[in-house]
């Protein structure tokens, strides 16, 4: 598992491990990753702009386990 904030870095590690397994098992296929950004925007607002206290509480209550596991701030 990895954090979305480090998706590219974490995915590269997964690909490295997959390629090591392929090499060990003499599998010719090699995985690769190109970091292409899609659906980018020029939004300047932080998430606080989109959530009020009530919606923050709703999100937290729905995703409490994730907040705790990943040590996100409430």
Image: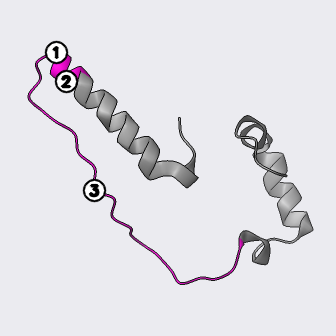
In whole angstroms, how far apart are the C-alphas of marks 2 and 1?
5 Å
Part of the protein shown in magenta: 21-46
Using a 10 Å C-alpha cutoff, classify the residue at mark 3 as few (fewer than 14 neighbours), some (14 to 19) or many (20 or more).
few
Task: Provide residue 33's location: percent of width, then percent of height.
Answer: 28, 50
Identify the mark at residue 34; answer none if there is no mark. Answer: 3
On the image, numbered disc 2 is attached to which residue?
22
Q: Is 37 one of the magenta-colored residues?
A: yes
**To which quarter of the image does residue 66 belong?**
top right
Task: Tell me which numbered mark, 3 or 1, is placed earlier along the sequence.
Answer: 1
Image: 58 above or below 39? above
Q: Are marks 2 and 1 in contact (CB under 8 Å)?
A: yes
Task: Identify which residue, 8 or 61, lies in the foreground.
Answer: 8
- Picture residue at 87% right of the left edge, 72% below the top: 52
Residue 73 point in image, percent of width and height? 81, 51
Would you say the magenta stretch is mainly helix, strand or loop?
A: loop
Q: Position of residue 21 (x, y in %)?
A: 25, 21
- Marks 3 and 2: in contact by CB < 8 Å? no
Q: CA distance from mark 2 to mark 3?
A: 19 Å
Residue at 78% over, 47% down: 62
């Amino acid at each position: 598992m990895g954090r979305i904030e480090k998706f590219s870095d974490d995915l590269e590690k997964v690909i490295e491990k997959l390629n090591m397994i392929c090499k060990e098992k003499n599998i010719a296929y090699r995985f690769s990753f190109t970091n292409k950004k899609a659906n980018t925007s020029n939004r300047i607002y932080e998430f606080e702009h989109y959530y009020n206290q009530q919606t923050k509480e709703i999100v937290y209550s729905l995703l409490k386990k994730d907040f705790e596991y990943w040590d996100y701030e409430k």
